[in-house]
Image (cartoon, helix red, strand yellow):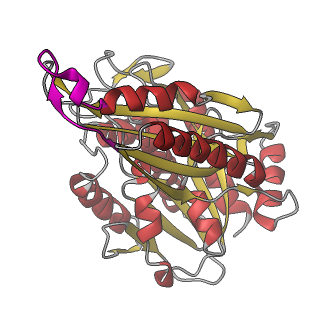
Amino acid sequence: MINQDRLVNSFCDLAAIDSPSGDEKEVAAFLIKRLESLGLNVEQDEYGNVIAKDEGDFPLLLSAHMDTVEPGRGIHPLVDSERIYTDGSTILGGDCKAGISIILEAIESLSEDGLNRRPIEVVFSREEELGLIGAKELEFSLLRAKEAIVFDGEGRVNQITSGSPTYLAFDVEIKGRAAHAGVEPEKGISAIKIASEIIVQLQLGRLDEQTTMNVGSIEGGSVRNAVPEDAMFSGEIRSHNEEALDKVKSYMLNILQDTRNRYADAVITEKFNTEFEAYKIDPQETVVEKVIDQLIVSKMEPELILSGGGTDANVFRSNGINAVVLGVADHGAHTVREHIIIAELVEAASFCRDLLLADA
């Protein structure tokens, strides 16, 4: 059975290891030793993703990511009778070290009890928070699984991500003309002014039930007494509807062209990049049916929830692996108010264990 103390301690040990995106080396080394102690064959691909597997046909892939967002250094987990949290100076790292802990505890408890389970493959990826980079670089030739459970959702394990949007990132750069702001401002072309005029025309926030748009960063200029020659801003468009996404992109391109027409001596360049593609799960997929059936057996009501975010499941699915994302008991992810409900963490580990046992 699930050992709650071991599960909580395992999470706290993981959370205390700094692993902001791009700095996963130490946590990877920790996980390699832990997976090897569970009798799995472990390796890292060229990108540093950790891959573990055992023998047997038709393995189930279990996955979570190793990296966390900032502020994620020097995390000191605090534990009471109900929750795991921090003092508010850092995130907790439940996204996604709760997922890692769930997988480790499920495997260890089955081994400890001497029970047979379904063959598995495990992937702990790098740099998920930067745009699923580790999954995109994953050596899929090392895997045989065609079904996956990705433990990377918010809330209880019965919260199933029913779909994820296409994510279109954009960067816009403006080059104007520098001039002394007090002596001859007329000779300048303010790149910051141009950037602000573009941004104010964009419809930001939730555009409809399936589409959002955001400008997340902006920078420009150098000193207060010069007309700024350079400015740039970055943002994103997300949508579950490809037609809606294309319309928003076209709308933005029209704004950029209109701005070029008004500022003929400025240079405005844009770059769009699709970070990941949308998907919707089919309730009749075998792995989805198994998850739903096991939730019902476990006396939990399955909740299919459309997500506005992306996970490694987006990449797995684009590479022929039917992946389902489940909740990991984490709440308030990416904030210093992040916390884990211990009862839900145990519940998720029990579900993972039972799923592997039921399918043995």
The span shown in magenta is 174-190
Where is residue 17, by image quadrant? top left
Q: Is residue 335 above or below residue 28?
A: above
Which residue is pictured at 69% across the width and 57% down the height? 355
Do we see residue 163 in this rendering?
Answer: no
Please provide percent x and percent y for residue 250.
Answer: 65, 49
Which residue is pictured at 59% across the width and 66% down the height? 316
Q: Is residue 289 above or below residue 264?
A: below
Quarter in which the C terminus is drawn: bottom right
Please provide percent x and percent y for residue 150.
Answer: 58, 55
Q: Is residue 186 magenta?
A: yes
Please provide percent x and percent y for residue 209.
Answer: 77, 33
Of residues 120 and 133, which is closer to you in this image?
133
Of residues 278 and 59, which is closer to you in this image?
278
Do we see residue 147 in this rendering?
Answer: yes
Q: Is residue 327 magenta?
A: no
Q: Is residue 217 above or below residue 167?
A: above
Q: Residue furthest right?
A: 284
Of residues 173 and 126, which is closer to you in this image?
173
Of residues 250 and 209, which is closer to you in this image?
250
